[in-house]
Image (cartoon, rainbow, N blue to C red):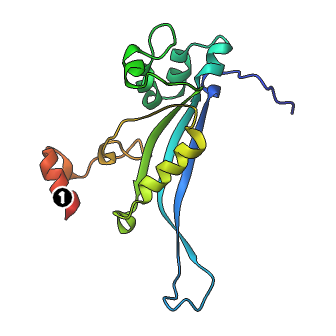
Amino acid sequence: AEQSIFKEEPDDYITRIAADIVVSEWPDPEGLTDEPVETVAGKLVAFAVDYYEAIDNGESIFNVLDAHSSDVAEYLQLFNDDDEFSAAVHKAAPDLFGSTLLIIDRVTIDKRFRGVGLGLVAVQELIRFWGRDGLIALKPFPLQFSGHEDRAWIPPPELVDKSRAEIRRAAKA
């Protein structure tokens, strides 16, 4: 089938980036084997929005972000009604240039691998590859309230009607 080089739908201007965060472990502490064991230590999900191409092709940034998902549409607040970055964005990043909005949607690290900087390294590599020419945005949010990838997820009873401090204490235990 012949594929068009033109974008046909508003959300065609958004690239979903999903990656496993992998660590290599050497099972032999003596170093007698050269074969590491690779383990998935976490996951990363992001979206790269090519907003300049969308605007150049007559697509509004509202249509692009809104067509994808409600999570991505939350970033409409970065733009004004003229499909330009808002005054608040220009104030925070006066020298902003580029054509990509990189939305870091989620980074999860399995409990066993937390505290050693894997999430930071994964985000640095994501930015190095995808976010060099544009704005990088994220909304830090505890995933226990988002349902992760499962829309049918229900918070466990121990998290319902708890204060943030109680939830933090439970997470540390």
- Residue ranking furthest to the top: 82
The total of numbered circles placed on residues is 1
Residue 127 percent coordinates (x, y): 53, 43
Residue 84 percent coordinates (x, y): 50, 13
Q: Which residue is mark 1?
A: 170
Residue positioned 57% across, 34% down in the render: 48
Quadrant assignment, res 64: top right
Q: Quadrant of the N terminus?
A: top right
- Residue ranking furthest to the right: 2
Residue placed most toward the observer, 56 or 172: 56
Q: Is residue 14 left or right of residue 30?
A: right
Q: Residues within 10 Å of mark 1 (few under 14, many from 20)?
A: few
Residue placed most toward the observer, 76 or 170: 76
Residue positioned 43% across, 49% down in the render: 107
Q: Is residue 25 left or right of residue 147?
A: right
Residue placed most toward the observer, 119 or 145: 119
Residue 94 percent coordinates (x, y): 44, 21
Residue 35 percent coordinates (x, y): 62, 81
Q: Can the viewer see residue 77?
A: no
Q: Is residue 72 left or right of residue 160?
A: right
Residue positioned 51% across, 92% down in the render: 30
- Given the image, on which type of amino acid does mark 1 rest? Ala
Q: Quadrant of the C terminus?
A: bottom left
Element at label 1: helix
Look at the picture and state if 114 lies above or below 68: below
Look at the picture and state if 24 lies above or below 21: below
Residue positioned 36% across, 63% down in the render: 114
Q: Can the viewer see residue 60?
A: yes
